[in-house]
Structures are given as structure tokens and as C-alpha cells.
Amino acid sequence: MKLDLLAIAAHPDDVELTCGGTLLKMAGLGYKTGILDLTAGEMGTRGTPEIRAREATKAAKLLRVSWRGTLGVPDSDVQPSRQHKFRLASVIRELRPKTVILPYWEARHPDHYHASTLGYEGCFLAGLKQLPLEGEPHRPFKILYATAYAPVRPTFVVDITAEFERRRRAILAFASQFHPPKSESRRQFKKTNVFLAIDRLQDEMNQLARHCGEMIGVQYGEPFLVKELIQVHDVVNMDVRSI
Ligand SMILES: [Zn+2]
């Protein structure tokens, strides 16, 4: 399958939280989009990998992606190793995305910053003709870094006002992360205190998207950073008011 846009992240639900609205919006424009989860999220404190897989399928449907897959890297051990890079390069050769979204390269969780490096290097390797790897060489044209939750100024923001509600449902599809499982008592669940309460998550989600939206004068937005400059063809018709 050939994709226009592929979002790569460490754990199932990372993509939903950082660029789900943008994926949904691009699907609406007629682009073929996809999500590659590097791990199955098996170290997640809540739920099982099977539950997470079901949730990921549900979220993918909500975001209207054409493809979702798992690379099979062990959770909490995401590394830009040769083996993982080759595996990723072969997926890139198969899917041939024009644009790739990666996590921002600085983060608290090592899986997140390693996912950024692994993603970049896998995309680079995929284009090397001499690589001992099956498939036609392919290198994505553009790499965007999703900077939601990163304390950096984004290069641009995507207006996701129309997509916000559906993105919210896609995030909440990962219910096992936010609710106590039935077998566990509420008290026990409270005691472990490792979950992110669902109301707090929603608050954070709304605030962040609203803050990014404000930066470009719309209700909700998702922030991205690119390393290159952005070329402008028409300075008379540019978005976002200055004064
Ligand atoms: Zn994560």
C-alpha cells in the first residue's frame, strides 16, 4: 500500500495524543494516511497488549487511517539499533509515504526520544540503494516533528477545530489506560495512583489544543516543527493575522 502520510510513534495512543487531528484532517482531504506504532505498548501499567490492540484498531477507524501496524520493538526498549532501523526501513519501502510525522526529539520518556531518532534514521536508510534490504529504495520527502507536550515553539500549527471532537473520541478509545479494570477494586486502583485520571487528561488535551489554536487564531490546533525553512509562494495571501 502506498501512503501519503505516515505517523510513527513509540506506543499505541501516542499518535492520537500528538497528531490525531492532523491525520483525520488529511484523510478528509483525500490523502491516504497511516500509523506505525513501534511497540505494542506491553509495558503500559493498565490493560493488556490484546486490549490495547483492540483499542488501537478502534482509534484508527475513528481517525480514518488506511493502515495501522506495529513494528514489534519491545516496549521501554526503543533504540535506534541496526536491527530496528532495518525493520523500519523495510516498512517505509513498503508504504512509501511522502510525508512522515515523528515525535519531537527531546522528551522525558526514553522511548519517545529514541522513537524520533529511530524514525529519522529508518527513513534515511530506506532510501539507500546499496542497503541489503528487499524492496525499492524510498525516502520520504518531508519529516514533521509533532511538538505537542514539548516545551518548544512550533514552526506551524494545523487547525483541527473541525476534527477536535472525533480526535477526542479516538484518544478515549484507549479506555484501558484511564479506567480501572473491572477485576480491580476502585480503592486498589486509587492506591496505585499511576493512572492518568480521565478528566485530567481531557482538561490537558483541551487546554493544549486551545493554546495552539490561539497561536493561529482558531479554536483548536496541533503544533509541528520542521528543521528546514518553509518556502512561501504568495506573501499577499498568507494565513494568520499579524495585528
Ligand atoms: Zn508514549
Image (cartoon, helix red, strand yellow):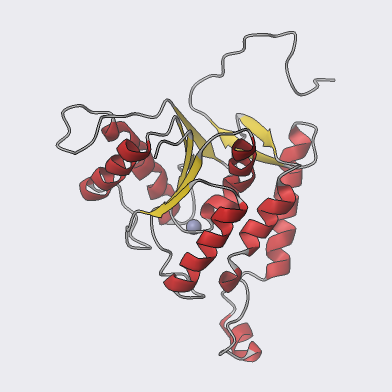
User: What residue is at 64 percent from the left and 45 percent from the top?
Assistant: 21
Q: From the viewer's perspective, is residue 119 above or below residue 171?
A: above
Q: Position of residue 182 (x, y in %)?
A: 59, 87
Give the percent coordinates (x, y) of residue 109: 46, 57
Residue 179 visible in the snapshot: yes
Q: Quadrant of the C terminus?
A: top right
Q: Is residue 195 visible?
A: no
- Residue drawn at (68%, 62%), measured in percent from left and top? 201
Point out residue 85 in the picture as x, y percentages from the top left corner: 27, 44
In this rendering, would 135 be left or right of 54? left
- Between 31 and 191, the one lying in front of the other is 31
Which quadrant, please, contains the N terminus?
Answer: top left
Q: Residue at x 39, y 29 (%)?
A: 140
The residue positioned farthest toward the right in the image shown: 243
From the viewer's perspective, is residue 48 above or below residue 135? Answer: below
Q: Is residue 51 shown above or below 137?
A: below
Question: Residue 6, percent across and down?
Answer: 46, 40
Q: Describe residue 243's horizontal placement relative to residue 228 as left or right.
A: right
Could you tell whether 176 is left or right of 137 in the image? right
